[in-house]
Amino acid sequence: MGKRMFLVCLLMIVILAISSSVQIEALRSVLRVLAVAPIGPKVSAFGSIYHIAPYGNDDNPGTAEAPWRTIQHAADAVQPGDTVFVHGGTYGEEVTFTRSGTSYAPISFTAALGEAVTIQGNLTLVQGTSYVSLLGFTVQGFRYWGITLQGDNHHIQLSQLNVTGGEAGIRLTEGYSGEDPSYGAVSDVVLEDSTVRDAIHTAVDCTPGPCDRMRFRRLEIYGSGLSAGFGGDGLGGARTGYCGRGLLYPRQRR
């Protein structure tokens, strides 16, 4: 048992030994401390914690002291409940995510706190990959789509991203507009606190859809369609669910 958890348990025993009126206030104090106390990177409620760094090696165990080198290696290794911290640097990869979490144990890929992570390539969640979070990445240098959900994906969180360029920054479902999706619908996707810019056609493309129970909030979208003669949408979707506050700048020709 970790030192922090031991101290918390000891404090709880002391609280239970005192009067009920004092117990309530003491318990509130403990909860306030737990709410703001930093959680160490070596602890996970459901799964393992791994690390990736530009100086790592995929033959390493993926610890903070001996990290992996590639995001793809981590994507191939994770299990439900795992968290992967990607440390600062540029990763030239086209990453394919095939492993899903569960409703109680999602999988998370996140930029390490305070570190700038750039993916020079693209990220694809293949058909059916679900309960996955991608947080804190800059994605650029791709030709077609920066982040793709092929279809039949659900419970995906995309947060604190900066996606630049391509034909579409983020593509939700594959197929042709007006036709059935090639790999099924997507649903329960949250895209938030992100910037998507300078796509040739559509910044966030949710066609052909359907895209059900979507949440778009606190987004900054601009520069779409500047060089295309058609399809210059900031946010294009079919059967989208909920749109929160954000910024969509009007299309402007250079």
Image (spheres, rainbow, N blue to C red):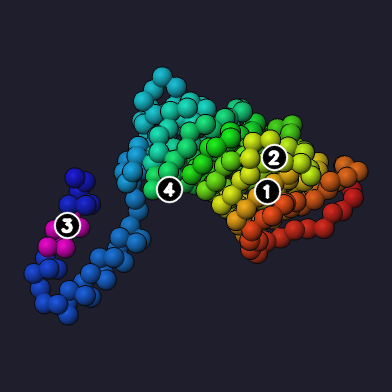
Q: CA distance from mark 2 to mark 1?
A: 8 Å
Q: Amino acid at mark 2?
A: Pro
Q: Amino acid at mark 3?
A: Cys
Q: Which quadrant of the figure has residue 185?
A: top right
- The earlier-in-sequence mark between 1 and 3 is 3
Residue visible at 80% across and 48% down in the picture: 224
Q: To which residue does mark 4 refer?
A: 103
Relative to 254, is 221 on the left or the right?
left
Element at label 2: loop
Q: Nearer the viewer, mark 2 or mark 4?
A: 2
* Residue 211 is a magenta residue: no
Q: Is residue 233 above or below residue 64?
A: below
Looking at the rendered image, the quarter that the N terminus falls into is: top left
Report the disc number at residue 9.
3
Residue behind mark 2: 181
Q: Is residue 194 above or below residue 18?
A: above
N-terminal of the two: label 4 or label 3?
Answer: 3
- Residue drawn at point x = 41 percent, y = 19 percent: 59
- The magenta-colored residue range is 7-13
> Quick check: marks 2 and 1 in contact, CB under 8 Å?
yes
Q: Nearer the viewer, mark 4 or mark 3?
A: 4
- Residue 42's quadrant in the figure? top left
Nearer to the camera, 176 or 189: 176
